[in-house]
Amino acid sequence: MTTTPAVTKKFTVAEYLAYDDGTDTRYELVNGELVPMSLGSGLHGAIAEFLNDFFRDEILRLKLNWTSKQMVVGVRSPRAGKWDTSRIPDVVVLPVSQWRELRNRGAVIELNEPPPLLVVEVVSESTKTVDYRAKRVEYNVLNIPEYWIVDPLINKVTVFTLIEDLYEPAEFVDAERIQSSTFPDLQLTVEQVFSAGDEQ
């Protein structure tokens, strides 16, 4: 006897934003399907928190009208196909005015809106392929000016900078200072990033 496989429910962005399964699970929307986001290691969370705080301090120091948010802003992706995709980066830097607009609706930056200034993904064993491949393509197509992949599995930070519509990668390791076009005077080394949380 042949059994028909269960059909996974597909969600629109509106349904995704309204979805509540009664748990604290965070989901990304990938081709219309809810994909649970893993909690990640303590180091993963410490790195995201460290970078969010570091960017906030830099924004304050430079008196920029920007803000940095950790895992609370979604970015809608123009993936091919009928169904929608919405990612939730570990850290997002965006103008304060854009953040204020998101406060009174679902916190997802839509395709017809300006992209965030910078996004960061911290790699976990379960997310490395998506972070290096799928998200790189999606963020590139969205014209996000700068995308960081922070990889504690190999102690490397890769900064993708949008140049003539394509991401150009620069890799940083050990005591090297991370070069950022968003924050040109950034005084931050790879070692500092990966020692996040050591003092706590």
Image (tube, helix red, strand yellow):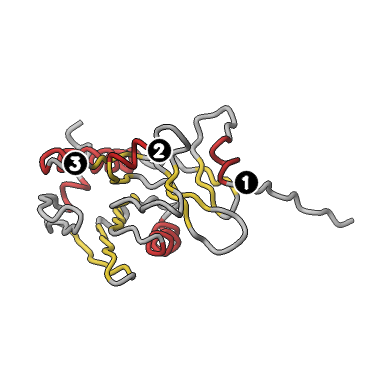
In this picture, residue 195 sits left or right of residue 96: left
Name the residue tied to disc 1.
Answer: 11
The first of marks 1 and 2 along the sequence is: 1
Name the residue tied to disc 2.
Answer: 102
Q: Position of residue 79 (x, y in %)?
A: 52, 61
Name the quadrant containing residue 141.
bottom left
Quarter of the rendering occupied by the N terminus: bottom right
Res. 54 mark: 3
Q: CA distance from mark 1 to mark 2?
A: 21 Å
* Label 3 environment density (alpha carbons within 10 Å; few <14, some 14–19, many ≥20): some
Q: Position of residue 196 (x, y in %)?
A: 21, 41
Q: Are marks 1 and 2 in contact (CB under 8 Å)?
A: no
**102 is higher (above) or lower (below) than 164:** above
Residue drawn where x is 46% and y is 42% of the image: 38
> Regarding mark 3 in the picture, which secondary structure is present there?
helix
Q: Are marks 3 and 1 in contact (CB under 8 Å)?
A: no
Residue type pointed to by label 2 = Leu
Q: CA distance from mark 3 to mark 1?
A: 35 Å
Residue type pointed to by label 3 = Phe
